[in-house]
Image: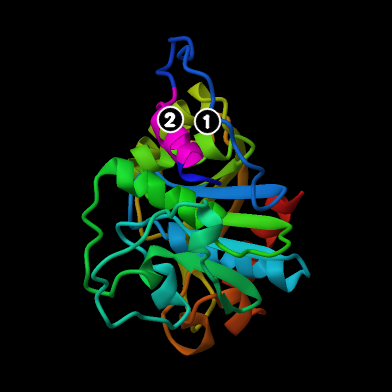
């Protein structure tokens, strides 16, 4: 992709239309093919629900089933995937090249391989304590680079960990990869469902395919007797994302963070655990 094409992509993005309003007249950008035939974008309405945990484990479970999987950490302002796979950049970045004359082939990025996954993240660019204080336009240009300058190789699935909410970056991802499906993550809390219902409304208005939803931290499983302990007041059924027509793909229990079950991805470190079984079922559901 040359610099002119990158400019056309960044200048032609538009947010999804609001509910009840027709799509804008601006044409979709001239898009290159996606890195994988299947793109799973993991979304949530709010932070702190375990979205990155679900993204990592779904990707690792697909890889364990023999699929070729890339994992794109697109939560560029808060990239957590590197730490979750035991990596950290200590040296702050002083600069970064988004494009060069001759196209993105001149700025090739090599993904890091862990647990059978090919992983790319802004956390490999900036140090652990360094903020990526860029404008929305620069962040979107970085997204283009992470998607198409990364040397993914042949992929069956690309799993994308998106920031919570409906930010510019989330809108850009679905515009760049219009065939991507959304996997929604909630916790059993009214606020988590409320914020994610807003995401559902925006995604449907943009004609984004909804793969389904995952309830993370559904209950605390007692390590002594195996009893599930509900930690949150129940969400009124009519206020849940399930009432909005989102297919419930699984419920992932909480466990005390000790032993193998306290390490991520749990589908690798504790494959026989209840958490791993629930996350594998989600991965197989989204794989079709």
Residue 190 to residue 273: above or below? above
Q: Nearer the viewer, residue 209 or 154?
A: 154
Question: Residue placed at 38% from the left, 64% from the top?
Answer: 122
Visible residue check, residue 149: no
Q: Disc 1 marks which residue?
A: 243
So how many labels did they put on this image? 2
Residue 275: where, in percent of width, then height? 57, 70
- Label 2 belongs to which residue? 13
Identify which residue is drawn at 42% across, 81% down: 87
Relative to 218, residue 85 above or below: below
In the image, residue 55 lies at what x, y percent? Answer: 53, 60
Left or right: 186, with 59 as reference point: left
| Quadrant of the rendered image containing residue 282 | bottom right
Question: Mark 1 or mark 2: which is in front?
Answer: 2
8 in magenta: yes
**What residue range appears in magenta?**
4-16
Q: Residue furthest bottom?
A: 259
């Amino acid at each position: 992709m040359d610099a002119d094409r990158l400019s056309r992509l960044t200048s032609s993005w538009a947010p999804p239309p609001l509910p009840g309003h027709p799509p804008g007249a601006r044409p979709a950008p001239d898009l290159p093919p996606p890195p994988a035939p299947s793109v799973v974008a993991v979304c949530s309405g709010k932070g702190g629900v375990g979205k990155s945990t679900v993204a990592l484990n779904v990707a690792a479970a697909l890889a364990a089933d023999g699929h070729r999987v890339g994992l794109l950490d697109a939560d560029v302002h808060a990239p957590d995937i590197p730490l979750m796979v035991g990596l950290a950049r200590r040296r702050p970045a002083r600069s970064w090249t988004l494009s060069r004359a001759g196209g993105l082939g001149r700025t090739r990025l090599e993904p890091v391989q862990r647990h059978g996954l090919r992983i790319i993240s802004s956390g490999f660019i900036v140090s652990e304590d360094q903020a990526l204080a860029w404008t929305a336009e620069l962040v979107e240009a970085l997204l283009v680079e992470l998607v198409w300058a990364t040397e993914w190789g042949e992929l069956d699935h690309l799993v994308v960990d998106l920031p919570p909410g409906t930010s510019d970056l989330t809108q850009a991802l679905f515009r760049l990869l219009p065939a991507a499906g959304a996997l929604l993550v909630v916790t059993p809390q009214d606020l988590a469902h409320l914020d994610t219902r807003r995401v559902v409304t925006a995604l449907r208005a943009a004609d984004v395919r909804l793969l389904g939803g995952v309830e993370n931290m559904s209950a605390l499983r007692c390590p002594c007797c195996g009893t599930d302990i509900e930690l949150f007041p129940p969400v009124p059924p009519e206020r849940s994302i399930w009432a909005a027509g989102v297919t419930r793909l699984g419920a992932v229990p909480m466990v005390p963070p000790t032993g193998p079950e306290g390490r991520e991805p749990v589908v690798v470190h504790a494959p026989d655990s209840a958490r791993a079984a629930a996350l594998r079922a989600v991965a197989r559901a989204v794989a079709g």
